[in-house]
Amino acid sequence: MQKADENEDDDDKDVLVKKCLTCKKVIEGKPWISIEIECTYHGCSYLCSKSLHENFGNGYWTHVINKEDFDEPRPICQKPTKLMGDITTGFGQDEIRDEIEQENQRTEMLEYEYECEISSSEEDTFDEDNYY
């Protein structure tokens, strides 16, 4: 008689089912995240765990019981509010400007010499008798 009573007691016990707090899906195996505040709550995936702060507030990391499954809590990166300035390091700007100016002067000299050569070669080959 006692064995029958034990079986009845086992049937009456509530079986603890791991359900996702967000989507209410039954979790088979290990939950993605488990939080213990008064009782244990679970999240089945990253997407479902993104909204846990709505239920527990922003400081729930201290209540996570499977911290070994995570590298670390990751902070939210703030986007810079001001515009970025000059992205160059600013070194050697004067030398670069001088080098550009020297290159421009060399180019002008080459162009001048080329024009002088062409005009002198045209003068050498100019023949008034063959000019129409």
Image: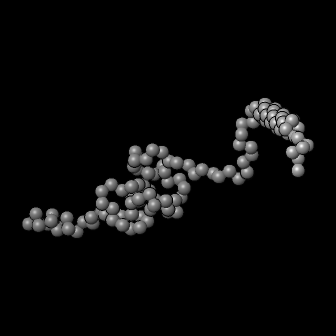
Please give left or right for residue 97 compared with residue 47 in the image: right
- Say above or below: 15 vs 35: below
Residue at image location 19% in from the left, 64% down from the top: 10
The quadrant in which residue 42 appears is bottom left
Please say which color scheme the image uses.
one colour
Q: Residue furthest front?
A: 129
- Give coordinates of residue 25: x percent, y percent: 36, 67
Q: Which residue sits furthest left? A: 1
Q: Residue at x 73, y 51 (%)?
A: 82
78 on left or right of 45: right
Q: Name the residue at the right extreme.
A: 128
Residue 98 in view here: no
In depth, the one of 42 and 76 nearer the eye is: 76
Q: In which quarter of the image is residue 106?
A: top right
Tell me: 11 left or right of 77. Answer: left
Q: Where is residue 11 in the image (x, y as percent from the top left)?
A: 20, 68
Please give the name of the residue rendered at 88% of the width and 47% of the height, measured from the top-left corner.
131
